[in-house]
Amino acid sequence: MRRNLTLCLFLGALIWSGIAHAQEWSGIIAPQRAMDWSGAGVSGGIPNRTIICTTLNAGATAAQINTAIAGCPTGQVVKLGPGTFALATGLVMKSNVTLRGAGADQTRLSIQGTDGCLGLRASVCVAGTGTWYGGALTPTNWTAGYAKGATQITVASTSGFAVGTILVLDQLDDTSDTGQTIISDLMPTFSREGGAPGRPNRAQQEYFQIVAINGNVLTLTPGLRMPNWRVGRSPQAFTYGGNIFKAGIENLSIDHGPAAAGTTGSGIAFHNATDCWIKGVRSLNGPRNHVWLRQAFRAEVRDSYFYGGQGAGSLSYGVESFVASDALVVNSIFHHVTAPMVIGNNIGSVYAFNYAIDNYYASQAWMQGAFVVHDAGVGMLLIEGNYGQAFQADLFHGTSAMVTTFRNFFAGWEPGKTSNTIPIQVQSWHRYYHHVGNVLGYPGYHNTYQSLSPSGTNGHTAIFTLGWGGQGGRRYSDDPPNDPRVAATTLRWGNYDVVSGAVRYEASEVPSGDAYYPIPIPSSHALPASFFLPSKPSWWGDRPWPAIGPDVTDGTGPGRHVHSIPAKECYDRTAKTSGILDFNALNCYGQQTSVGRPAAPDRLDVR
């Protein structure tokens, strides 16, 4: 029976690799610098569960809801009816159960307390067992199989591993500049504050599921994403405690009380979580973050609305990743949130078709970006089709590599903002980025194509700043140095910006001569509609597809290259109460459960 199970999982992995669509970025980005992003999010898509195990009406307590979740059979739904549920403590999910409301404008949870959630203090806890990243269970040396895309690796010992186990691979941080990718939070060389998530000095992590064990050889799904794994950095393999699998929260509103506020409190916390999701959720007044992806593999956040926070300082986030792999954050609205999508160490995830507006910050003149790469260990991300203020990669907690922005509109502007208003800002040591097919800048405001730093007369009105090591427009004695390799290794192709007033296809902005990861000059100006979807998703409706890019010529944004995206249309058309959307995803997007990618075979749930 065990042999048959192993064979089924192995064949499933082969089938999945065979049906994945061809890489749409081929001919634009070199294979070593990109990956197959079609598998991000819940494997096979979010399941549409129809069997209701329990229905609870308004007035039910947190204890009653938690009891119903704990007793719900596999693959079934705990249904919450319309009305307000005033809850004194947090809710706790379990594997293979969905918690579903009647719609985010009908089912409202007011949660004044929290669940401890393995130290995360969350309004809703989606967590397995085990400890945070310091508690890896018996790491073993990873001795062979480092090539990008490899699905088989050799380890010194397979003790504690089993088919279906979620496996983590990491390696030591870089300690010096090799001229190639740099993944490190070493102070002051590569970061200002250190403290990146992950095991100490091992920020780069990728997650996998074991599909076969043969001696000391592990067969994994998916394959290795990053190309910089190497024996000289002492790579290791390990697992944490038990995971929670395929738990979902849908179609309800959560107002987070003050108990979750502070540096550790979370709205919805995913911890040791695999194939878990939220969909159609309205989250109000988030504490440190609305959603925390903390040791999360193939998480999915979609069709949701996030409003406000419990502060407007440095810790007031929307979706925050804190060791994640292959997540999908898609088609969601971030409104009056200081930092909508904050990306800690995270490999292989996709952030697509999201809308950010009014990034409220205590410093009124300072503009916060919709996306902030904020920790060491970020790599192989796809940021596609989003509509917001800016993309930024900072140096507070370390460095990243091989991040792609594609077909986004980054205006670099918000009303009243005059500082940090740069559409794309990538600081020192964040190398081998790709900016393709984006629309950048605000007409009449930006006046410089590229500046080293956001300072001086035109620094805040530049389209790009690349390789700056200072803080804002200032430099302190212990800041990391500037890094000319950032610009030298970056691909810029097919972007429209308001300063150039044209789409740029410049050979000088293609790193074709790079000694390590060169990109040949593309032979065509044609761009695919998506880098991760094979076709227009059904929930897109009859809107123009793609919505943003140099080949869009009848839009209303800069150069007529921008149409509205579904999340923005939802924001624009939905009524507000006290400035907050009366949000119901079903009214905006309908009953959709997938982003248009082919279904994959289920992985084994191991608890």
Image (cartoon, grey):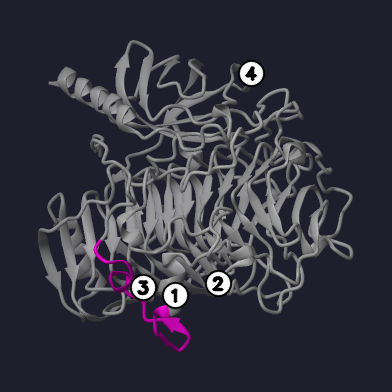
- Tag 3 and tag 1, C-beta contact below 8 Å: no
> Which range of residues does the magenta coloring cover?
573-591
Residue 387, quarter of picture: bottom right
Image location (x, y in percent) of residue 415: 67, 78
**What amino acid is found at the position of numbered circle 2 in the picture?**
Ile
Q: Earlier in the sequence, mark 4 or mark 2?
A: 4
* The C terminus sits in image quarter: top left
Residue that mark 2 sits on:
357
| SS category of the residue bearing label 2 | strand
Query: Callout 3, which amino acid?
Result: Ile
- The residue labelled by disc 3 is 254
* Residue at point 54%, 40% (across, down): 198
Q: Nearer the viewer, mark 3 or mark 2?
A: 2
Residue at mark 2 to residue at mark 1: CA–CA distance: 9 Å
Camera-nearest label, 3 or 1: 1
Label pair 4/3, CB-CB below 8 angstroms: no
**Residue linked to disc 1:** 571
